[in-house]
Image (cartoon, grey):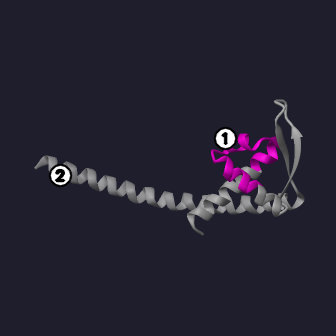
């Protein structure tokens, strides 16, 4: 899988997690919480609604502005579970690769220290 696809899947799972905890929220609040653009939030929400993963209902929030209540559908709950498993596997694989890279880097640092120490002695 490519990095852009992984990033999109990460955005989707983070959004579903957030909506599961806080249904009545504006798209602006979601964007700020997730650290993504308002346009991207709108795009993701529309795609999730279109796929039947979430439902959106209009309501007026306390600032007299229009907002939506977003609810995970039964299909959305299943999809979130699948996404969570995929997210965990991806992050676990990244962790394993990073661990190997850190071991190799640590050896390289030790070799560099030895080289510098030798050079300073001469």
- Other-residue count near label 2 (Cα within 10 Å), few / some / many at <14 / 14–19 / ≥20: few
Q: CA distance from mark 1 to mark 2?
A: 52 Å
User: What residue is pinned by disc 1?
Assistant: 32
* Left or right of residue 97, residue 30 in this image: right
* Residue depicted at x 31% and y 53%: 110
Q: Main secondary structure of the magenta part?
A: helix
* Left or right of residue 98, residue 29 in this image: right
Instruction: Between residue 68 and residue 33, name the one nearer to us.
Output: 68
Task: Name the spot of residue 86 as percent of width and height, x first.
Answer: 69, 63
Task: Name the spot of residue 103 as percent of width and height, x first.
Answer: 43, 57
Q: Is residue 55 magenta?
A: no
Asked which secondary structure carries label 2, the reply is helix
Which of label 1 and label 2 is nearer to you? 1
Asked which secondary structure carries label 1, the reply is helix
User: What residue is pinned by disc 2?
Assistant: 118
Dot 1 or dot 2: first in sequence order is 1
Against 69, residue 12 (above or below) is below
Quadrant assignment for the N terminus: bottom right
Q: Is residue 34 magenta?
A: yes
Which stretch appears magenta?
17-45
């Amino acid at each position: 899988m490519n990095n852009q696809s992984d990033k999109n899947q990460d955005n989707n799972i983070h959004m579903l997690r957030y909506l599961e905890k806080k249904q009545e929220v504006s798209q602006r609040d979601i964007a700020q919480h997730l650290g993504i653009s308002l346009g991207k939030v709108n795009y993701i929400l529309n795609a999730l609604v279109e796929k039947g993963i979430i439902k959106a209902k209009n309501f007026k929030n306390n600032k007299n502005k229009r907002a939506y209540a977003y609810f995970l559908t039964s299909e959305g709950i299943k999809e979130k579970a699948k996404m969570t498993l995929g997210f965990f596997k991806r992050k676990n694989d990244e962790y394993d690769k990073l661990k190997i890279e850190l071991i190799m880097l640590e050896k390289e640092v030790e070799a560099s220290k030895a080289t510098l120490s030798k050079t300073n002695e001469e």
